[in-house]
Image: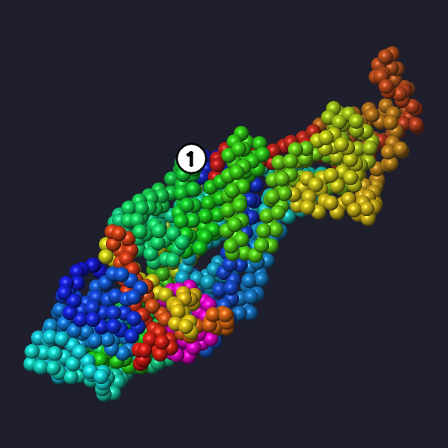
């Protein structure tokens, strides 16, 4: 990420969650009442390219963007998007601006006139997972309750069939993580899965970024052969015996007594532990506890890097906001995504359950709702600068005025 | 020393190390483990309780590699609660030193499993790695040879058969637990630095990295430090340098003066900036680098007491303060004996000499227990069989009275005997001083004296079945003193010759005039001669060597 100048400001759009987007000569920016600085928005995926000429806030975490050469929709949590094509009825550019009418329809200004588009028409997207392939046992039909064993490379290919306005696009995420990743519609491959069990959720998107109900697939990635039981146990045993007999031979050679042999045994144990510790340190990772690598805080930042921190904010009945710890509502971890993800995706029932649990614990200060958001900072020479937070979820939705 | 023992490896791992240091380290590690288990218990039990609930508020299970290898699955709430009970029990047994090796082994297994459960539900932490490896070595080492109930019981038993010489000062098997902990700590810091360099290069210390790390965490000082890019840059360079070069403490012990405070500041800084918690489990293992057994002497007798006393007090107060943030106040009661020990050692006139009958099994056992509990080394033990030494020190004492009852002489030369002597002793032992006032209550005095008389009067000597005669039955004639003199000059290890059959009566030897020493009475005929004293328990060392002045701490030639 980097800072950039706005240039001339062309349009503003205030999103119901409080974020204001700015379309300017320098690109798209965001700002909110809590911060002083505008933050550039980096679009990704099939988001409209070009210089923005008009923006309009949409429902359900969407932002409609018109640039001089494209028109489309952008998700306001991760800023991926989709652009309309001529086959969608999009007139030729260049485009001059974007507005809306009272019915919620979008008005796209072109050199030939104004075109009207009403979003969210037609059925929502749907899709099926037909087949799971690149498995050790060959391709298999998809079954929702099945756990598929993959190769240790952590890669799986899916065969999907979807129906969506403007053609289906797909996203996937790990069930315990908040962020979605693109899945190539022509070649839907999920890769780089680490050893262990994974539950992946997949959704289909239409051109209005409406989502289908999610479908889950459970996979299991084995450890590489060098970390498998079949290799580790005999190797470790062989290594231990070799070290042990080495020390015993030295003890025998030195013609020592019982103590010398006892030291030989202990020396073998110590040498083995040291070898494992060094190996664990070289191949960093924390899940080999107590033989762990130490990769914490090894990431590097530079000027302009963006730092994100998930937060849970409670909303009181009078509208004021207070910080809330997830564990106060029964969520087992501190304010990390692992604790907050269920509040994002696990249904309204769980969100109500969390509120009830919190209010039972704090009857003197009951919450009317909560907001899951990401607090952000940009690193600069003058210190970290707060920029507009990203709101992931508001519960209940009436609090934000942004309903689904 | 054999050729192999002269090598670097045996000198590094198996140098003669004071057993007290290992014992103090054992207690510290087990207390740290216990504190951590209690701290984690709410989380682990909550995860266990949520297991299997329908879509409830629970965390996903991502087993650690060890659990995957062994095929271990999460356990339910009831099993978790029993696990916690056994773990706490094993840790407490290890702390108090009962069945020490077994307790340490059980603590290790259960602690690894308990922590593995916590890591499998959440994110693995790194602050308990050194504790775990320390626990791995304790069952293999003589960790219970000192500061333990096992040691007291062993001394008690050995004193009963007259074999107690006090435990050895050091052992070559006392070094390796400390060494392994030191190396684990060094590897932890070293690989932290190498991971940063491997992942980000030296650019990790550009200042922005630390700025970004700090701002990601809501610590008390995060915002303040992250505003200053230059400060972040300097701290980043310092962190890398200290972590990368920390292993120098193994080869240059003098560098510990710098590195130990440096990493301690690093952990405290991360507590205040990254909100990591105190990571006490990590930095308390730095005690593996310290000669713990020297701390009492540094405080009480060392030339730089003016520095060490406030340093230790402040350090202890800091640890207590941190504990008070997370644990209920009553846990501080465990520190009371330590505080009492310091008070006893600091007060003038707390030294006491105990004159006991070394031939009496009861006295030896009682003395062995007292010496084992004498953390501050206030007790000096004198054997009445070496009467010359006792008389030179305390001419006012009567030998027969000392044989009959244990005598105590305090620093003000006040003499107490029997029950009163034990009562005087109770004030000087940290574990009993708090309750010594009970011994002054009249009902307790009566009962105590009665019990004492029964025990002292029924003492059984080494010669089974023979009870010592009452003092008024013992002759105080020349022959008695002569025989006594003979026995006291017997060399160590020599057994008393077997009783001979009565020889034919010999004519009395003519004595030279003036040969009789002044004050001695003429010996009476044989039939009036006092009976032979009961055979004394053979001792492997001369009575004079029983004095408490022996230092239980061997000189640490190779500091671990």
* Residue A241 seen in render: no
Q: Residue furthest left?
A: A112
Q: Which residue lies furthest to the front in this view?
A: A318
Q: Which residue is drawn at 52% across and 62% down?
A: B41
Left or right: A21 in relation to A88: right
Residue B536 percent across, percent down from the top left = 77, 34
* Closer to us: A274 or B209: B209
Q: Residue at x 11, y 75 (%)?
A: A96
Q: What stretch is highlighted in magenta?
A: A327-356
Residue hosting label 1: B254
Residue B422 percent across, percent down from the top left = 75, 40
Q: Which residue is drawn at 20% across and 59% down?
A: A3
Vertical placement of residue A186 versus B173, above or below: below
Q: Which residue is drawn at 41% across and 52% down?
A: B272
Q: Which residue lies furthest to the bottom in this view?
A: A122
Vertical placement of residue B390 versus A200, above or below: above
Vertical placement of residue A283 versus A340, above or below: above
**Where does the N terminus of chain A fall, quadrant-wise?**
bottom left
- Is label 1 in a helix, a strand or a loop? helix
């Amino acid at each position: 990420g980097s800072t950039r100048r706005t240039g001339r400001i062309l349009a503003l759009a205030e999103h119901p969650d409080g974020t204001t987007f700015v379309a300017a000569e320098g690109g798209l920016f965001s700002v909110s009442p809590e911060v002083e600085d505008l933050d550039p928005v980096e679009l990704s995926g099939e988001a409209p390219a070009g210089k923005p000429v008009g923006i309009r806030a949409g429902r359900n975490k969407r932002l409609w963007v018109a640039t001089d050469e494209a028109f489309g929709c952008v998700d306001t949590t991760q800023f991926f998007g989709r652009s309309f094509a001529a086959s969608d009825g999009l007139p030729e550019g260049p485009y001059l601006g974007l507005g809306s009418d009272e019915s919620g329809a979008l008005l796209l200004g072109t050199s030939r006139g104004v075109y009207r588009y009403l979003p969210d028409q037609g059925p929502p997207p749907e899709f099926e997972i037909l087949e799971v392939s690149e498995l050790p046992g060959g391709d298999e039909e998809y079954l929702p309750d099945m756990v598929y064993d993959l190769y240790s490379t952590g890669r799986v290919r899916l065969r999907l069939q979807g129906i969506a306005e403007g053609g289906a696009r797909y996203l996937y995420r790990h069930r315990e993580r908040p962020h979605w990743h693109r899945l190539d519609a022509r070649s839907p491959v999920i890769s780089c899965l680490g050893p262990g069990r994974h539950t992946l959720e997949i959704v289909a998107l239409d051109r209005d970024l409406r989502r289908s109900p999610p479908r889950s697939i459970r996979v299991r990635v084995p450890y590489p052969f060098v970390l498998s039981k079949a290799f580790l146990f005999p190797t470790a045993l062989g290594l231990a015996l070799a070290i042990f007999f080495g020390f015993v031979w030295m003890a025998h050679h030195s013609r020592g007594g019982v103590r010398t042999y006892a030291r030989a045994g202990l020396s073998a144990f110590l040498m083995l532990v040291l070898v494992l510790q060094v190996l664990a340190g070289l191949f960093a990772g924390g899940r080999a506890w107590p033989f762990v690598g130490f990769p914490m805080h090894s990431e590097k930042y530079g000027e302009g890097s963006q730092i994100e921190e998930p937060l849970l904010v409670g909303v009181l009945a009078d509208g004021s906001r207070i910080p809330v710890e997830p564990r106060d509502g029964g969520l087992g971890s501190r304010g990390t995504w692992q604790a907050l993800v269920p509040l994002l995706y696990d249904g309204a029932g769980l969100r109500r359950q969390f509120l009830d649990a919190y209010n039972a614990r704090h009857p003197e200060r009951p919450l009317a709702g909560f907001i899951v958001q990401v607090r952000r900072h940009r690193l600069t020479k003058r210190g970290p600068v707060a920029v507009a937070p990203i709101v992931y979820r508001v519960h209940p939705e009436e609090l934000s005025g942004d309903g689904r | 020393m054999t050729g192999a023992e002269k090598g670097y490896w045996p000198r590094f791992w198996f140098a003669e190390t004071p057993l007290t240091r290992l014992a103090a380290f054992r207690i510290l590690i087990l207390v740290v483990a216990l504190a951590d288990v209690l701290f984690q218990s709410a989380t682990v039990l909550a995860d266990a309780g949520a297991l299997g609930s329908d879509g409830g508020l629970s965390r996903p299970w991502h087993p650690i590699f060890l659990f995957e290898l062994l095929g271990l699955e999460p356990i339910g709430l009831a099993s978790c609660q029993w696990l916690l009970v056994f773990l706490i029990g094993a840790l407490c047994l290890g702390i108090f030193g009962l069945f020490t090796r077994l307790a340490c082994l059980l603590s290790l297994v259960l602690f690894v499993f308990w922590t593995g459960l916590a890591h499998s539900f959440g994110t693995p932490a790194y602050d308990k790695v050194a504790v775990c490896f320390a626990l791995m070595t304790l069952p293999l080492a003589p960790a219970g040879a000192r500061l333990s109930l096992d040691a007291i019981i062993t001394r008690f038993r050995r004193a009963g058969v007259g074999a107690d010489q006090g435990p050895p000062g050091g052992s070559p098997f006392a070094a390796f637990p400390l060494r392994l902990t030191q190396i684990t700590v060094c590897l932890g810091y070293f690989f932290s630095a190498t991971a940063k360099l491997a992942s980000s290069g030296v650019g990790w210390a550009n200042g922005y990295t630390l700025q970004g790390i700090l701002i990601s965490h809501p610590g008390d000082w995060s915002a303040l430090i992250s505003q200053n890019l230059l400060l972040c840059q300097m701290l980043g360079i310092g962190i890398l340098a200290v972590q990368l070069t920390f292993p120098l403490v193994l080869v240059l012990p003098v560098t510990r003066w710098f590195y130990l405070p440096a990493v301690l500041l690093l952990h405290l800084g991360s507590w205040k900036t990254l909100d990591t918690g105190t990571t006490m489990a990590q930095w308390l293992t730095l005690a593996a680098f310290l000669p713990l057994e020297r701390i009492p002497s540094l405080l009480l007798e060392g030339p730089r007491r003016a520095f060490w006393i406030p340093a230790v007090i402040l350090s202890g107060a800091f640890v207590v303060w941190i504990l008070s943030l997370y644990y209920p106040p009553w846990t501080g009661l465990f520190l009371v004996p330590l505080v009492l020990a310091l008070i006893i050692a600091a007060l003038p006139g707390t030294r006491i000499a105990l004159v006991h009958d070394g031939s009496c099994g009861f006295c030896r056992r009682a003395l062995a227990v007292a010496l084992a509990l004498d953390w501050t080394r206030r007790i000096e033990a004198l054997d009445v069989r070496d009467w010359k030494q006792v008389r030179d020190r305390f001419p006012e004492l009567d030998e027969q009275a000392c044989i009959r009852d244990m005598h105590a002489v305090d620093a003000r030369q006040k003499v107490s005997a029997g029950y009163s002597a034990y009562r005087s002793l109770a004030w000087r032992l940290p574990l009993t001083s708090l309750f010594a006032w009970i011994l002054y209550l009249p009902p307790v005095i009566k009962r105590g004296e009665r019990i004492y008389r029964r025990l002292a009067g029924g003492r059984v000597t080494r010669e089974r079945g023979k009870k010592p005669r009452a003092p008024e039955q013992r002759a105080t004639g020349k022959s008695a003193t002569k025989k006594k003199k003979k026995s006291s000059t017997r060399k160590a290890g020599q057994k008393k010759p077997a009783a001979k059959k009565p020889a034919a009566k010999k004519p009395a030897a003519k004595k030279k005039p003036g040969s009789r020493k002044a004050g001695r009475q003429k010996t009476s005929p044989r039939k009036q001669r006092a009976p032979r004293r009961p055979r004394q328990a053979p001792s492997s060392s001369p009575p004079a060597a029983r004095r408490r002045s022996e230092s239980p701490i061997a000189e640490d030639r190779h500091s671990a």
